[in-house]
Image: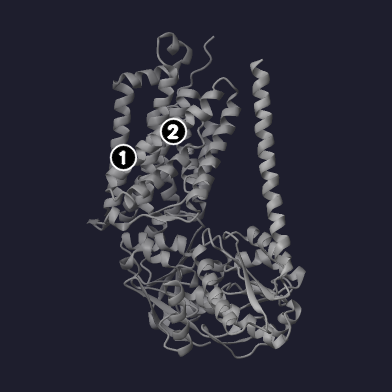
Amino acid sequence: MKKNNRKKIAALVIMVFMLAIVAGCGGGAADNGDKAGDKTETINVGLNVELSGGVASYGTNARDGALLAIEQINAEGGVLGMQLKPIVRDCKSIADEAMSVSAALVNEKIVAQIGPLTSGNVAGSTPIMMENHIPLIAPAATAVNVTVDEKTGKTNEYIFRVCFIDPFQGTLMAQFAAENMEAKTAVIYGDNSSDYAKGLAQYFEKTFVEKGGKILATEGYVKDDRDFRATLTKIKGMNPDFIYVPGYYQEIAPLIKQARELGITAPMGGGDGWDSPDMVSVAGNEALNNTYFTNHYSSEDKDPNVVQFVEAYQAKYNKDPDGFAALGYDSVKIMVLGLEEAGEADPGKLAAALSNITDFVGITGNMSIDEQHNPVKAGVIIEFKDGKQVMNTRIQP
Amino acid sequence: MLELIQQIVNGLSLGAIYALIALGYTMVYGIIKLINFAHGDIMMVGGFVGFFSLTLLGTNILVAMLVAMLVCAILGVLIEKIAYRPLRTSTRIAALITAIGVSLFLEYTTIFALGPAQKIFPDSAFPLKAYDIAGLSILNKDVFVVVSAVVLMLVLQYIIKWTKTGKAMRAVSLDQEAAVLMGISVDKTISVTFAIGSALAAAAGVMYGVYYSTVNPLMGIIPGLKAFVAAVLGGIGIVPGAMVGGFVIGLLETMVSGYGNSLYRDAVAFGVLILILLIKPTGLFGKDTGEKV
């Protein structure tokens, strides 16, 4: 008798679970239905960004910058007589999730998608955007193969970006290391699990060697690593003049901290992946002294456009905008320019207009989109001084 | 030479953390022949409790560790009562699968409750001091981790060898049915084992947080697996084996990163698992207790 009762209870529990699952799915579908209704009054803009996971600070800040731009534009009357409606979704810093988020956004009839932030996650979204002929504007994806198909050499018709590309970044830092820092030897210790970091390392090495420097060693770590001391001890023994550490902040921050703890005093450099408030909170002010990274802009720039943006951002969010916020803002602005040139809220026409943009004045610099959908623009070298990001030099290509 | 000693220092602190987690695995296996895959996640919970103790309650690091150990001891006992005890008479596979389930449950509940982002340990919890001894950089963190781990292991050895509870634990792991016949409460002994094992894992979690300055919900997976390898290496079910195994794996990892290629680090750790199971499955300290006819 007891066994029968247990089986009944088990069956009941399973049924309750099934109902819960079905209810959950059903709820989701109903939501989608509602949104499609009010398309005539608004232009839907999809924001597919990393709000959680390994690069959450990039997506969060880019979203904030984008939303500020949308708010300002809507306040001035919107675009083509319609208001912009942002639809924000979290792709959790995972490429597969970015793909399903894009699919969901496409269902909501967006005119363009802004984001994701990292090159790997943009690659996840790309097939869906290309299939549905909807433009994707990447605020900060810097790998070359984001806009250009590696195998065919053809530019991806619907993928655009407002940031510089990795060859530029890696080259910039190598130039800085060789010329400004007068380094003769360098060690590269980069993230081996990301194409972004590998690209940066490749171009750094190329330019550094061209300028007469010597790469003593190339070491690697992978995502989610937290213990770098063994390799850092090895690097300390080599005594390089400069250490190039391309990667994302979650690993870089403990890496730099451990390097300084081990007594490595050499200057260290990296790419825009370093740009996050977490760097200071994890590594601490002291560890970050004498470190540099290439970035898209500096909030200290005295250019009136930048000053205005920084003030508006601070007023709305009570924090300083970082590079990703500025790029999120510029992504929306360039999309709006494209819409105005296209004359219609049509994704295909928007894509065509975007490929022809010249002299867009953005917060992150003046840019013209070239044949590979890459903007030709300047980059800055940022230095960490006492935990603050300070602009060191601005380099025009 | 100096670099080698520095690497050894690195390896010892890493090994200390693995050893503490490995002890939990080995004790639980010794007593109920279950590989508790949720153990790494108990370490993660311990790290988080330590974090909240430091930030919300404003305690110092030692109190935070004790709080974490207490909370995780209770958590360990609860898990045993809810998830493993009902399956004591079922097949071992069932218990193993449940352990994996508990592990996933702990991880994703933490993500659900606290978000997947990492939490940063306040610097004030453990102000850094580097001791420059003859060119070696030894941090007070290294000393803290290794000393605490050794102290905890000594306490554990004392409990096992010199207290009645320890005797009961040894008896139950030797022969559960005979222990019952001797009047030992098997349920209570198992609960105590889980409590002690989880407390040690919690200590490891707090040390991890202090050492790497961050805790995140998925931080228990890889150290948990490596600690499992350490436990098997030392001889699963044998307490001194887990301690030695932990330090061996820590040193091995550091040596591979330092002198070989840092990318092969994980591959070597798990390669050791395969090797030991092929060559000496009972582990370094394992005795080959054959079937007594």
Image quadrant in which you'd find residue B293: top right
The kind of residue tagged 1 is Leu
Q: Position of residue B7 (x, y in %)?
A: 36, 52
Q: Position of residue A209 (x, y in %)?
A: 49, 77
The kind of residue tagged 2 is Gly
Q: Nearer the viewer, residue B165 or B278?
A: B165
Image quadrant in which you'd find residue A213: bottom left
- The reply to whether residue B281 is in sight is no
Per the image, label 1 sits on a secondary structure element best described as helix
Q: CA distance from mark 1 to mark 2?
A: 15 Å
- The N terminus of chain A, quarter of image: top right
Q: Position of residue A17 (x, y in %)?
A: 66, 39
The correct choice, above or below, for B83 with respect to A295 in the image is above
- The reply to whether residue B60 is in sight is yes
Sort mark 1 into few (<14), some (14-19) or many (20+) by Cα contacts within 10 Å.
some
Label total for image: 2
Q: Are marks 1 and 2 on the same chain?
A: yes
Image quadrant in which you'd find residue A203: bottom right
User: On what subunit does the disc labeled 2 rest?
Assistant: B
User: On what subunit does the disc labeled 1 rest?
Assistant: B
**Residue at the image position 44 percent from the left and 44 percent from the top:** B44
Q: Which mark is residue B76?
A: 2
Mark 1 or mark 2, which has the lower sequence index? Answer: 1
Q: Which mark is residue A184?
A: none
Pointer 1 residue: B66
Q: Position of residue B169 (x, y in %)?
A: 39, 21
The correct choice, above or below, for A76 with respect to B185 in the image is below
Q: Nearer the viewer, residue A268 or A345?
A: A345
Sort mark 2 into few (<14), some (14-19) or many (20+) by Cα contacts within 10 Å.
many
